[in-house]
Image: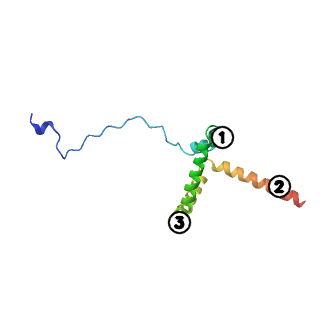
């Protein structure tokens, strides 16, 4: 066995580790249902954090507000927002929550129409 056979050549690429065959569930979103679930649990989480650590919650809200103001206050931020709104609306209309939103809107409009007719008579 010679020295050249036992040591890798300088141009040889290192072997890469094989990835796991298990699916990675942590940190992944499974669509709109997860977003809705997270949105519904947000008030409960905010109340809990306000009771336990109000200074952390206040700092978080302040930081998010600052970043939102900086992004939306710039031309680039407004352009990105203007491009994202139609995409978001298109996804919302084609989602599973769209029929529920339509029913909710019809209920509200129906109540307003009934109140208007009641005022006229």
Q: x%, y% of residue 25?
A: 47, 37
Q: Residues within 10 Å of mark 3 (few under 14, many from 20)?
A: few
Q: x%, y% of residue 28?
A: 49, 42
Against 106, is 79 above or below?
below
Element on which disc 3 rests: helix
Disc number for residue 47: 1
Residue at (61, 44) in percent of width and height: 39
Element on which disc 1 rests: helix
Q: x%, y% of residue 33?
A: 58, 43
Q: Whole-Å distance between the Cαs marked 3 and 2? A: 43 Å
Residue at (58, 47) in percent of width and height: 59
Residue at (80, 57) in percent of width and height: 113
Q: Return the residue at label 2.
A: 114
| Relative depth, front residue between 116 and 74 | 74
Q: Residues within 10 Å of mark 1 (few under 14, many from 20)?
A: few
Q: Whole-Å distance between the Cαs marked 1 and 2? A: 37 Å
| Relative depth, front residue between 3 and 51 | 51
- Mark with earlier residue (1, 3): 1
Against 26, is 72 above or below?
below
> Looking at the image, can residue 94 be seen?
no
* Direction from residue 1 to residue 24 in the image, left or right: right
Disc number for residue 84: none
* Direction from residue 41 to residue 16 in the image, left or right: left
Q: Return the residue at label 3.
A: 75
Q: x%, y% of residue 88?
A: 57, 55
Observer-side mark, 1 or 2, equals 1
């Amino acid at each position: 066995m010679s020295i050249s056979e036992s040591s890798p050549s300088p141009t040889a690429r290192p072997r890469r580790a094989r990835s796991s065959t298990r699916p990675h569930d942590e940190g992944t979103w499974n669509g709109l249902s997860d977003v809705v679930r997270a949105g519904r649990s947000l008030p409960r989480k905010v109340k809990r954090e306000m009771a336990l650590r109000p200074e952390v919650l206040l700092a978080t809200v302040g930081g998010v507000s600052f970043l939102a103001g900086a992004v939306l206050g710039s031309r680039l931020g407004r352009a990105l927002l203007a491009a994202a709104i139609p995409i978001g609306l298109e996804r919302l209309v084609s989602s599973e929550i769209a029929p529920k939103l339509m029913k909710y809107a019809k209920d509200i409009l129906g109540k307003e129409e009934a109140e208007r007719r009641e005022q006229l008579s």
